[in-house]
């Protein structure tokens, strides 16, 4: 999708972006918690879905493309929550390198 193909009216789906914080548990270990980085609205499209057999169990995953307004503070170690389901961010693209929109490739069914 080109930059000019996107409009604010297409941003219908609420999404939350989260960043992991690692804290010491006091016993020599650590614990990972996810904190809200920001909430916004986005244009979301399901790209594909698949199933695979790993470790003697069936795992399903879904690939999703998300378009939203550009933010420079997001990276692939963050995650996006879409309708209560966390998705691992796989790639973040600056659409046409114009700092107006970003295209995010995310995947569900993977460890975050």
Image (cartoon, helix red, strand yellow):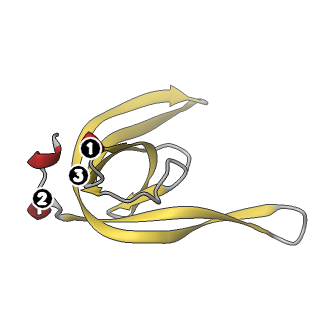
How packed mark 2 is, by other alpha carbons closer than 10 Å (few <14, some 14-19, many 20 or more), is: some
The answer to which of marks 2 and 3 sits earlier in the sequence is 2
Looking at the image, is 98 positioned above or below residue 21? above
Picture coordinates of residue 72, whole percent (x, y): 42, 57
Apparent side of residue 109 relative to residue 8 in the rendered image (left or right)? right
Q: Nearer the viewer, mark 2 or mark 3?
A: 2
Residue 19 sits in quarter: bottom right
Question: Residue 51's quadrant in the figure?
Answer: top left
Q: What residue is rendered at 30% in x and 53% in y?
A: 99
Q: In the rendered structure, are the residues bearing label 2 and label 3 in contact, judged by CB atoms less than 8 Å apart? A: no
Looking at the image, residue 60 lies above or below residue 3: above
Q: Which mark is residue 10?
A: 2
Q: At numbered mark 1, what does the secondary structure look like: helix, strand or loop? A: helix
Q: Which residue is mark 1?
A: 95
- Image vertical order of residue 52 relative to residue 81, above or below: above
Q: Which residue is mark 3?
A: 44
* Residue at horizontal 25 percent and vertical 55 percent from the top: 100
Q: Where does residue 91 sit, x and y in percent of width and height?
A: 42, 41
* Quadrant housing residue 83: bottom left
* Residue drawn at the location 37% of the way across and 59% of the way down: 71
User: Cα distance, mark 3 to mark 1?
Assistant: 15 Å
Q: CA distance from mark 2 to mark 1?
A: 15 Å
- Furthest residue toward front: 98
């Amino acid at each position: 999708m080109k930059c000019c193909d996107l409009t604010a009216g297409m941003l219908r789906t609420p999404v939350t972006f989260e960043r992991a914080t690692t804290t010491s548990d006091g016993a020599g270990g650590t614990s990972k918690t996810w904190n809200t980085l920001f909430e916004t609205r986005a244009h979301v499209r399901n790209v594909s879905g698949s199933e695979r057999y790993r470790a003697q169990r069936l795992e399903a995953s879904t690939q999703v493309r998300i378009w939203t307004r550009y933010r420079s503070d997001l990276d692939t170690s963050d995650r996006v929550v879409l309708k209560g389901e966390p998705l691992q961010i796989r790639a973040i693209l600056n659409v046409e390198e114009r700092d107006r929109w970003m295209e995010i490739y995310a995947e569900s069914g993977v460890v975050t």
